[in-house]
Image: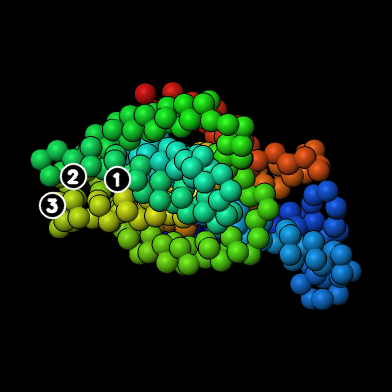
Amino acid sequence: MTARTTLYLLILLAFTLLLSVLALGMGTVHIPAMEVVNSFTGKAEELYSRIVLELRLPRILTAALTGAMFAASGVILQGVVRNPLAAPDVIGVNAGAALAAVLVLLVIPASPSWLLPWGAFLGAWVGFACTYLLSRMNGQVSPARLALVGIAVGAALGSVEQLILVRAPDGIAQALSFLSGTIYAADYTRVYRLLPWAALLLPLSLILSRYANLLSLGDASAVSLGVRLERMRAILLTLAVGLAAAAVTGAGLLGFVGLIAPHMARLMVGPQHQNSLPVSMLVGALLVIGADTLGRSILPPIEIPAGLLTTLLGAPYFLYLLKKNR
């Protein structure tokens, strides 16, 4: 890790902590920054303390964890697929999760709250499995074919999802909140659901980041450097899907975080994954914390889903990248 990367990590970490303190005080009930700090020392008013520690802190933690995981997934995918436009959306993860969420609510209308995210988690893996299996030719998966098949699988699953939403009863509208990506009503149960995945997969992605560097050089170069190509590609893809699928259980489908954060990180510290990956995690956390905070502060008590705001930011950036890379 370079000195430049360390500097950016310290700056981003400081910004993340500052934004978190501000976010804990923003919302329908405004809480001064000093009262937010006092909530952690037991010196704040009881009402302020309960709002900060029981309602808003789990949202901040959920936003940070999901943002970091989506971002890490995007970095790995862009390295493996060797395409700067790659993201969890491209390999069928988001489409599979969305379809599964709709099916859960349609088949089990009175399903418990925990079933929806776990159904989406399973759906994300099914969507990726379809993409991966259809991409294999002669026992190998080429990055270009993986991306193209992923787009086709995503479109097909998305069409089925839209058909179900159009034909389904009104109760299925509950799925729309999940599909738009939201941190609303996040509690410690959701945080504890995310923590084991984050604690396992984020460090693992840092450990394997050098292999993503080798794969990004091209198949011939990676093989000449001693990489067992298909096995390492499968491991990294599984890791990326695991990160995105786990993040979906915490925040639904947050669009473009896995696309924007890696690009911003590369602009700061360059293309080497051991540098861009940790920076991208913090950028992703900042993006989602900021989007959630803005969404609940613009028109209180009405909340705008964080996913809508990340999409409003990400769609123009995606068009810019598309034009730049054509």
Q: Is residue 86 visible?
A: no
- The kind of residue on which mark 3 rests is Ser
How many angstroms separate mark 1 from mark 3 (CA)? 28 Å
Pointer 1 with pointer 3, Cβ within 8 A: no
Q: Nearer the viewer, residue 215 or 118?
A: 118
How many angstroms separate mark 2 from mark 1 (CA)? 22 Å
Mark 2 lies on a secondary structure that is helix
Quarter occupied by residue 7? bottom right
Residue 285: image location, x then y, percent: 57, 53
- Find residue 129 and name its label: 1
Relative to 255, 201 lies left or right: left
Quick one: which residue is furthest to the right in this view?
45
- Find residue 219 and name its label: 2
Question: Mark 3 vs mark 2: which is more N-terminal?
Answer: 2
Total tally of numbered discs in the picture: 3
Relative to 125, 300 lies left or right: right
Q: Quadrant of the C terminus?
A: top left
Residue at horizontal 58 percent and vertical 36 percent from the top: 172
How dense is the environment of label 1, judged by Cα within 10 Å: few (below 14), some, or many (20 and up)? Answer: some
- Which residue is tagged 3? 224
Q: Nearer the viewer, residue 220 or 145?
A: 145
Mark 3 lies on a secondary structure that is helix
How dense is the environment of label 2, judged by Cα within 10 Å: few (below 14), some, or many (20 and up)? Answer: some
In this view, the mark in front (3 or 2): 2
Question: Mark 2 vs mark 1: which is more N-terminal?
Answer: 1
- The kind of residue on which mark 1 rests is Ala
Relative to 105, 236 lies left or right: left
